[in-house]
Image (cartoon, rainbow, N blue to C red):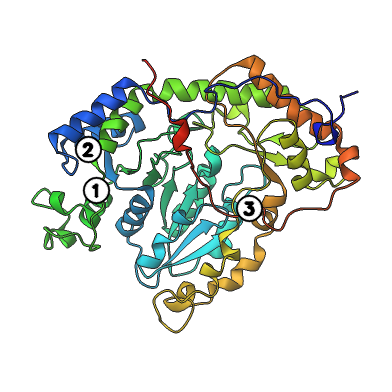
């Protein structure tokens, strides 16, 4: 029999100080010196360190080309543009994702069409993509959501059938594996964020990778005016070299590139420890009713990369219908951070229903479209219930078994005492799944670089 829940006055499950267990990214003197070197050389807007970072990243990724951007959103915009997405076109995407996966399409005059997700992976369900395809479809956005690899075999099969480009959004899963191969090499192009909250963190940056020289050159021409020169060989864009075709500057600051070079050296080692810690947490909870790990089957040779913004799958039917909101309240009382939900499905947001961003006299999402794609939004049951069936879990950055055990006990204790929680369960909060992630740091608690 478990001890009384802390929410009712019992002892907390988590008692040990986690120390730097959750500190990320790991910043050392080597990062500091690399950034200071750029700062004092006054080369923040140069490209020499950036091109070196791109070359090293491409080699690590297993791609022919890599191209750095100022942020992940810009890299996704460039990927769409390079794949030929333009006025009147459609892209197919999961609705359960961060807004940057799809909103750049608006800037190109294109519109997102949303497919449902697989309830276990929380990634786009290949079986639902085909109903979204039309003669205007140009690309599929495959988001490796929360680090879980999407079903790339299924996605590429549908793409091949209809002649569609596949853009992998690897923002949550840099370095992750799908059936033994690194994510980002399955589609025609990959784009990703490298901002400070990601498992691959460089401050603020984005990266695009591809094996296709035309896609690479079009991406380069999109927002890298100083590199859009005589090196371009693609005929249709060669005539316009010199100025960015999208009318904006998208290059990455070289201080971020310098940090990226350092982080890349240690990334695989550090994320391997993250996976060891996170898998240990889930192994401890194996068999706990109501709680299921959000991770690939171990037999698939797939993994969760750096396990970004980790979540668990919630099975309320195994806990008498206990709301995930009440469950999380009980876990929090035990001393572990735990919040219900993940992202608010994009199709439920007014920005994809009624907003007229460009003053066209109709909602932007359908202003340039040949059909009202909003009519397809009613067939996304798994996307719409995801926030009632997910919850956050600690994102352990170091493998410290004794501490991890306490956190696992907090979750197990709440689940095993669900009958007590049901007595005053008021149901799920209307605010779960706000669709935003914040990366706040208290300036009074600044951490100094650690020694290598």
In which image quadrant can residue 315 be found? top right
Q: Residues within 10 Å of mark 1 (few under 14, many from 20)?
A: many
Label located before the other in sequence (3 or 2): 2
Q: Is residue 165 left or right of residue 308?
A: left
- Which numbered disc covers residue 433? 3
Task: Read off the residue under disc 2.
Answer: 50
Q: Residues within 10 Å of mark 3 (few under 14, many from 20)?
A: many
Tag 1, which secondary structure?
loop
In which image quadrant can residue 211 be found? top left
Q: Is residue 130 left or right of residue 224?
A: right
Label located before the other in sequence (1 or 2): 2
Task: Read off the residue under disc 1.
Answer: 251
Spatial distance from mark 3 to mark 1, Cα to Cα? 32 Å
For the C terminus, which image quadrant? top left
Is 387 or 212 nearer to us in this picture? Answer: 387
Identify the residue at horizontal 68%, vertical 44% (top origin). Answer: 390
Tag 2, which secondary structure?
helix
Please say if 384 is above or below 299. Answer: below
Single out the mark in the foreground, 3 or 2: 3
For the N terminus, which image quadrant? top right
The reply to whether residue 288 is in sight is no
Is 244 or 447 nearer to us in this picture? Answer: 447
Q: Is residue 328 left or right of residue 121?
A: right
Q: Residues within 10 Å of mark 2 (few under 14, many from 20)?
A: many
Identify the residue at horizontal 48%, vertical 56% (top origin). Answer: 99
- Across and down, in percent, residue 398 comes to 53, 21
């Amino acid at each position: 029999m478990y001890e009384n829940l802390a929410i009712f006055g019992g002892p907390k499950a988590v008692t040990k100080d986690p120390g730097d267990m959750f500190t990320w990214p790991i910043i050392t003197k080597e990062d500091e010196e690399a950034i200071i070197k750029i700062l004092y050389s006054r080369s923040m807007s140069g490209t020499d360190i950036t091109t070196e970072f791109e070359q090293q990243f491409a080699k690590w990724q297993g791609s022919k080309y890599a191209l750095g951007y100022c942020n992940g959103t810009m890299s996704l915009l460039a990927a769409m543009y390079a794949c030929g997405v333009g006025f009147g076109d459609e892209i197919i995407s999961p609705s359960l994702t961060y807004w940057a996966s799809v909103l750049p399409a608006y800037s190109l005059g294109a519109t997102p069409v949303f497919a449902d997700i697989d309830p276990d992976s929380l990634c786009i369900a290949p079986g639902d993509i085909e109903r979204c395809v039309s003669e205007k479809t140009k690309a599929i956005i495959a988001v490796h959501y929360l680090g879980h690899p999407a079903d790339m075999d299924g996605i590429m099969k549908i793409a091949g059938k209809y002649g569609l480009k596949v853009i992998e959004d690897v923002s949550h899963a840099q370095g992750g594996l799908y059936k033994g191969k690194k994510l980002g090499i399955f589609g025609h192009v990959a784009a990703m964020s490298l901002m400070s909250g990601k498992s691959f963190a460089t401050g603020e940056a984005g990266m695009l990778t591809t094996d296709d020289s035309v896609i690479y050159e079009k991406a380069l021409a999109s927002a890298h005016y100083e590199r859009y020169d005589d090196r371009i060989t693609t005929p249709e864009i060669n005539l316009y070299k010199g100025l960015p075709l999208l009318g904006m500057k998208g290059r990455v600051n070289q201080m971020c590139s310098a940090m990226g070079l350092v982080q890349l050296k240690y990334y695989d080692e550090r994320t391997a420890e993250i996976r060891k810690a996170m898998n240990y947490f889930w192994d401890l909870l194996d068999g706990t009713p109501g709680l299921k790990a959000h991770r690939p089957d171990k037999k698939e040779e797939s993994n969760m990369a750096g396990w970004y913004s980790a979540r668990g799958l919630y099975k309320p039917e195994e806990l008498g219908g206990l709301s995930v909101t009440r469950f999380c309240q009980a876990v929090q009382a035990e001393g572990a951070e735990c919040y219900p939900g993940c992202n608010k499905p994009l199709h439920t947001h007014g920005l994809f229903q009624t907003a007229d961003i460009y003053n066209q006299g109709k909602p932007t999402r359908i202003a340039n479209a040949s059909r009202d794609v909003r009519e397809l939004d009613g067939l996304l049951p798994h996307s719409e219930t995801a926030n009632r069936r997910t919850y956050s879990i600690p994102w352990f950055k170091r493998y410290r078994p004794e501490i991890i055990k306490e956190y696992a006990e907090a979750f197990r204790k709440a689940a095993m005492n669900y009958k007590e929680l049901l007595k005053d369960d008021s149901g799920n909060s209307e605010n779960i799944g706000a669709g935003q992630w914040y990366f706040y740091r208290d300036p009074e608690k600044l951490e100094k670089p650690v020694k290598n």
